[in-house]
Image (cartoon, helix red, strand yellow):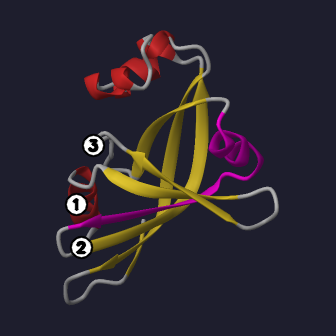
């Protein structure tokens, strides 16, 4: 599977599991929506409250993994997360109306954090020839 195909498939997979390294060294996972915010360079974008456990875990260890499922396709992205706080121009660029249900004050929500996951590796299953793709 080519990078372009992975990105296109990811845009159709709104929900994924974001896994981070927990304080005890174990794996911590939670469902997240990328709001179709997937870029050609392999970056995925997620909004969160800055006080969450995932943001704390990512600030201590940026290693993360995204696990997504679509129709007949499964994708696991591995990479590192970067936390963006207080960057309203970037927030506005990635904001979608669907986010209003979680963040009533929009991009002015106190503690709003944008998580950028820059994928360096993808594992894909579902079609012949799928496997590991270095991004």
Residue found at x 44% / y 20%? 103
Q: Which residue is mark 2?
A: 73
As drawn, which residue projects farthest toward the bottom? 128
Residue density around tag 1, few if under 14, some if 14–19, many if 20 or more, within 10 Å: many
Q: Which residue is mark 3?
A: 36
Residue found at x 24% / y 73%? 73
Query: Which SS class for mark 2?
Result: strand
Sequence-first disc among 3 and 1: 1
Relative image position of residue 16 (x, y in whole percent): 39, 56
Query: Which SS class for mark 3?
Result: loop
Residue 68 appears in which quarter of the rendering?
bottom left
Relative image position of residue 112 (x, y in whole percent): 55, 22
Query: What is the CA distance from the residue labelled 2 to the residue labelled 1?
Result: 8 Å
Residue density around tag 2, few if under 14, some if 14–19, many if 20 or more, within 10 Å: some
Residue found at x 26% / y 70%? 2
Image quarter hosting the C terminus? bottom left
Q: Which mark is residue 96?
A: none
Relative image position of residue 24 (x, y in whole percent): 82, 62
Image quarter hosting the N terminus? bottom left
Queried whether the magenta region covers residue 69, the answer comes back as yes
Front in this rendered view, residue 75 or 131: 75
Relative image position of residue 76 (x, y in whole percent): 42, 69
Residue density around tag 3, few if under 14, some if 14–19, many if 20 or more, within 10 Å: many
Do callouts 2 and 1 mark residues in contact (Cβ within 8 Å)?
Answer: yes
Q: Which residue is mark 1?
A: 9
Front in this rendered view, residue 23 or 65: 23
Residue found at x 38% / y 50%? 41
Query: Which SS class for mark 1?
Result: helix
Extent of the magenta region: 52-70
Please say if 9 is above or below 57.
below
Sequence-first disc among 2 and 1: 1
């Amino acid at each position: 599977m080519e990078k372009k195909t992975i990105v296109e498939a990811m845009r159709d997979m709104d929900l994924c599991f974001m896994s981070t390294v927990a304080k005890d060294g174990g794996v911590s996972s939670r469902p997240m929506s990328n709001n179709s915010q997937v870029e050609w360079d392999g970056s995925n974008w997620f909004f969160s409250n800055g006080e969450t456990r995932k943001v704390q875990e990512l600030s201590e260890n940026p290693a993360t993994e995204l696990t997504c499922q679509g129709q007949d396709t499964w994708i696991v992205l591995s990479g590192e997360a970067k936390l963006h706080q207080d960057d309203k121009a970037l927030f506005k660029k990635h904001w979608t109306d669907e986010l209003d249900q979680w963040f009533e004050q929009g991009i002015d929500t106190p503690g709003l954090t944008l998580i950028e996951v820059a994928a360096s590796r993808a594992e894909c299953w579902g079609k012949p020839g799928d496997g590991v793709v270095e991004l």
